[in-house]
Amino acid sequence: MNMIKKIKNWMIYSLTEKPSCYVHVDEPKSLQDYRQLQYNNWCKAKGVFNGSYLPYKPETLLKRGWKDISVEEYKNRHPSSYQLQRKSTGQIVRYEEENETQYAHYHWENRTSLDGDLKNDAYYLDRYGKACRKNSHKSHLAPFDKKYKKKR
């Protein structure tokens, strides 16, 4: 049984591309989805934060080699918020602190849309790595791959 699992994993690994970041998968439908699950499990096991898998405290990202690229005037208005960049991939996430209307959450910037016409329609990525509108519910990412719920 264990040998069959190893062969299956090897086939998935050899026939697919390595994912560049953690992207949530509800139900795998292709070999690439299975490879994404393998990568997601590896991220969780090794404590590699990226994509839609982010820690409760943004300071953890700073300890793991992410760079704080927050603009000074933004930091003055929101001292507990961060804009962080992963050095290896250039991925940028913005952390927003908890307040009376929302829980603490992240936004994952869509780097491909920042230059083009899609600036507001595809400004962020959702937990599945798909482009979504700025200020949309989908753009709010809860830490550790949970669904984001708005406060009432």
Image (tube, helix red, strand yellow):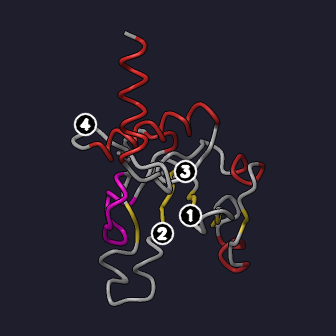
Instruction: Compare marks 1 and 4 and give the one earlier in the sequence.
Output: 4
Q: Marks 2 and 1, how far apart in space?
A: 8 Å
Three-letter amino acid code of the residue under disc 2:
Glu
Q: Residue furthest left?
A: 29
Three-letter amino acid code of the residue under disc 3:
Glu
To which quarter of the image does residue 132 belong?
A: bottom left
Instruction: Compare marks 4 and 2 and give the one earlier in the sequence.
Output: 4
Pair 2/1: label in front: 2
**Residues in magenta?**
128-139
Q: Sort mark 2 into few (<14), some (14-19) or many (20+) by Cα contacts within 10 Å.
A: many
Q: Marks 4 and 3, how far apart in space?
A: 30 Å
Instruction: Compare marks 2 and 1 and give the one earlier in the sequence.
Output: 1
Quarter holding the C terminus?
A: top left
Specify the label residue 27 is tagged with.
4
- Residue at position x 31%, y 71% from top? 133
Across and down, in percent, residue 97 comes to 58, 54
Q: Which residue is mark 1?
A: 94
To which quarter of the image does residue 65 belong?
A: bottom right
